[in-house]
């Protein structure tokens, strides 16, 4: 079921600036970053590729996601 939801969001967000804006307002990007920490490798992969696609379309997301990553992804350096 979770993969169906992921496909839905991927289709809704790609090339949809209004959808991406609303997704960000609802804290969706932090959800994707947390999905990248899941134990399910397929979920990690899908989340990573979706984030990469979104950052390719909207380079301004990179700066915003750096802020999120400091909150949700432990620094390994």
Image (tube, grey):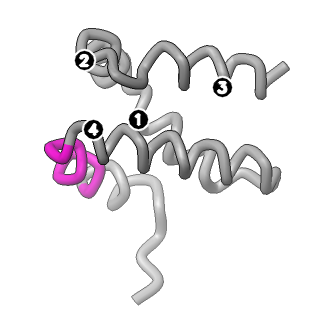
Circle nearer the viewer, 3 or 2: 2
What are the residue bounds of the magenta stretch? 59-66
What numbered label is drawn on residue 40? none
Residue for point 30% across, 46% down: 56
Q: Which residue is mark 3?
A: 6
Tell me the chief SS of the magenta region.
helix
Classed neighbour count for the residue bearing mark 1: other residues with Cα under 10 Å, few (<14), some (14–19), many (≥20): many
Classed neighbour count for the residue bearing mark 2: other residues with Cα under 10 Å, few (<14), some (14–19), many (≥20): some
Residue extending furthest toward the bottom:
77
Q: Is residue 39 left or right of residue 64?
A: right
Quadrant of the snapshot with the C terminus: bottom left
Q: Which residue is mark 2?
A: 17
Estimate the x, y position of residue 33 in percent, counting from the top left: 50, 47
Badge 3 element: helix
Q: Are marks 2 and 1 in contact (CB under 8 Å)?
A: no
Residue for point 23% across, 43% down: 61
């Amino acid at each position: 079921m979770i993969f169906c939801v992921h496909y839905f969001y991927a289709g809704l967000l790609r090339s949809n600036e209004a959808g991406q804006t609303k997704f960000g307002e609802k804290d969706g990007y932090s959800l994707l970053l947390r999905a990248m920490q899941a134990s399910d490798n397929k979920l990690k992969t899908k989340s990573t590729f979706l984030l990469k696609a979104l950052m390719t379309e909207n380079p301004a997301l990179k700066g915003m996601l750096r802020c999120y990553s400091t909150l949700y992804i432990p620094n390994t350096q």
